[in-house]
Amino acid sequence: MNQSSSSSRVLSGMRPTGRLHLGHYHGVLKNWVELQHQHECFFFIADWHALTTHYDDPSVIPESIWDMVIDWLAAGVDSEAATLFVQSLVPEHAELHLLLSMITPLGWLERVPSYKDQQEKLKEKDLATYGFLGYPLLQSADILIYRASQVPVGEDQVAHVELTREVARRFNHIYGREPDFEEKAEQARKKMGKRAAKQFTQLQRAYQEQGDPQALEDGRALLQAQQNINTEERERLLGYLEGSGRLILVEPQPLLTKASKMPGLDGQKMSKSYENTISLREKPEHVEQMLKRMPTDTNRVRRTDPGDPQKCPVWQFHLVYSDDGTKQWVEEGCRSAAIGCLDCKGPVIESVLNELNPMQQRAAEFEAQPDLVRRIITEGSERARVVAQETMREVREAMSLRGFES
Ligand code: TRP
Ligand code: SF4
């Protein structure tokens, strides 16, 4: 496992939608597999999020969760490198969601673009619910509870990370302003030792008086490197550095995943709703058959008719999978009718099968060991829960939720 600090913690989630396909692999999972070796990563299955749109038919969710975990593992997401968990097994997400809901203006949620878009798109469903309006805030809780600084998401989710930043800022502003904030911050500053304390003050001035962004960055790095202060003191100093209150919740950044260029079998983007997918566990014979049946440039009626790769979905696959030599062979062979479409599909079929083969082997291994898969998720959820509980202790304290304790 990667032991880097929370300053580079990564969190992302996926709704359980059933079996994953090559679009998910190229668009998301390949990226996760890389990130898990560079950062401390938390990846989770957002089963409560699935309920916001599928509340009328939740019975399919458990199987979708199961399939998704297996597909993640098959794709190379590694339960030793990253923490894998299920949202509903960490109920603290719900508590934070509730507490954040107290300070979140309705307008912030109504303005999230996906709110109206999705209602339009899923017209057959009644999405005028409290849960659906609040779902971006649930996502904020998902992120903030791990103090994740980076959230790998697609373009469509950036607005949700933006909302998360605003909510974190508002929370810190309201609850990070302890009455004796400056006094406590000064105490913490001195605790760092003479040199670091002096350096801190210089950076604090450079940032607050001259707005020097490098000073802010250096100041944060300085605080991260300190061994003599605890988390609470670090949060206080982070806020002191920026001129706000104590930073209890961390503002995350979206880590934009490059838009996947993975085409579907019809040349449109690969997506379940277009029925043009190749799922990760599709049988090789079937994959081959689907690719062989794929439409090509419609001008190539006969084998002797020349074609244009630009008008052919198969070309999109070559762009993902083929080297320059092969691509040149396609360009020339297609335009001169020197090759047939089945010839042209040969290298694509081979590449897709080669890519799927190790995944399918891993999938088979995990399918054969359901107890292992269950353990990966329960242990991952327990690990996640420890972190979530730590944040909740501080959140409750900041909000004066002490129960009966004085
Ligand atoms: N809303 C995301 C989606 O529909 C899934 C999600 C839920 C998520 N919580 C998250 C993604 C937290 C990143 C971080 O794809
Ligand atoms: Fe498409 Fe290849 Fe056939 Fe040209 S030769 S039309 S690129 S499948």
Image (cartoon, rainbow, N blue to C red):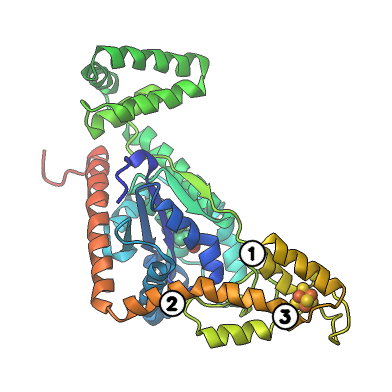
Can you tell me whether the CB of the residue at mark 3 lies under 8 Å from the nearest atom of ligand 2? yes
The one nearer the camera, 288 or 160, is 288
The one nearer the camera, 337 or 209, is 337
The one nearer the camera, 282 or 193, is 282
Q: CA distance from mark 3 to mark 2?
A: 26 Å
Whether the residues at callouts 3 and 2 have beta carbons within 8 Å, the answer is no
Check the image and report above or below for 392 versus 56.
above
Q: Residue at x 33, y 77 (%)?
A: 365
Q: CA distance from mark 1 to mark 3?
A: 18 Å
Q: Secondary structure at mark 2?
A: helix
Can you tell me whether the CB of the residue at mark 1 lies under 8 Å from the nearest atom of ligand 2? no
Q: Which residue is mark 3?
A: 343
Q: Secondary structure at mark 1?
A: helix
Left or right for 267, reference 122: right
Disc with the residue nearer the chain's start (1 vs 3)? 1
Q: Which residue is mark 1?
A: 320
- Residue 167, disc: none
Q: Amino acid at mark 1?
A: Val
Q: Which residue is mark 2?
A: 360
Q: Amino acid at mark 2?
A: Gln
Disc with the residue nearer the chain's start (1 vs 2)? 1
Q: Residue at x 24, y 66 (%)?
A: 378
Q: Amino acid at mark 3?
A: Asp
